[in-house]
Image (spheres, grey):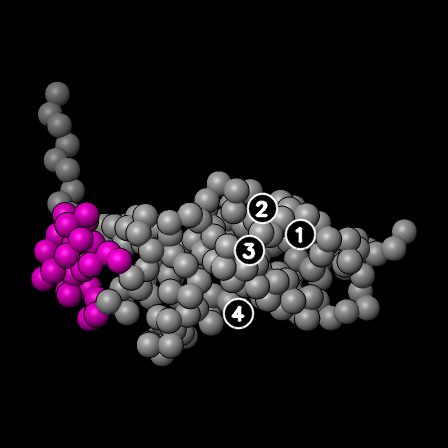
Amino acid sequence: MRSTPSKPVSREETKQKTRAALIDAGVALFAEEGLDAPSLDAICERAGFTRGAFYVHFPDRDAFLEAVMERLGVEFLDAVLGVAGDENAGLAGTSARFMGAVAKGDYPLMREGGVRPHQLLDACARSQAVRARYVALATESVARLTRIVRADQKRGVLRDDIDAKSIATLLLAAIIGVQTMNDLRMSVDLPRTGLAILRLLKTAR
């Protein structure tokens, strides 16, 4: 029986695989060593490529960091906040997914040994492009949270005397605040704090 010849891999597919491998290496090393420690040589070595291959895809480290942030950010938002049409899980379900992600070490800014919030803010201060990417992810977080809150308000689960976007913004601000407290090694009972916020927002019955 004659085997069917495999389809040759196009140059564009090869380029995309190389780019993805470099981003994978960055994700892994940043999670292990933080944002500043891994060198470009270490990232390239982990991915199995040269610096020349790196610069084909990324003009500098900041552009690479943007790509890593985009990968991690979108994956995390999809896993925890869902996409348009997933609002029916409600804020309680969303909160439970977030707590679970933090407990498992899947939340990039609160895992041990990984990226520290101050490192990301330093990168934002150095690079307008990195700052813009971080702001875009934060803005998308608020947009998705707003849809979730609004759906709960329509079901009568959450109080509706506060604008949904304002609640969403407050929730994100609380998460960023907890990140900072965690970075300062302050003791924060995240599940209890999350439950307190939910109780404040629930309708009185």
Spatial separation of the CA atoms under disc 3 and disc 4 = 27 Å
Quadrant of image for the N terminus? top left
Residue found 55% across the figure and 55% down from its top: 186
Which of label 1 and label 4 is nearer to you?
Answer: 1
Name the residue tied to disc 4.
139
Q: For numbered disc 4, what is the local secondary structure? A: helix
Q: Which residues are magenta?
A: 37-60
**Is there any visible trace of residue 93 in the rendered image?**
yes
Give the amino acid at mark 4.
Thr
Neighbor class of circle 3 (other Cα within 10 Å; few <14, some 14-19, many 20+) is few
Q: Position of residue 15 (x, y in %)?
A: 18, 56
Name the residue tied to disc 2.
99
Name the residue tied to disc 3.
186
Give the amino acid at mark 2.
Met
Neighbor class of circle 2 (other Cα within 10 Å; few <14, some 14-19, many 20+) is some
Q: Looking at the image, tell me whether mark 4 or mark 2 is earlier in sequence order.
A: 2
Residue found 62% across the figure and 68% down from its top: 169
Neighbor class of circle 4 (other Cα within 10 Å; few <14, some 14-19, many 20+) is some
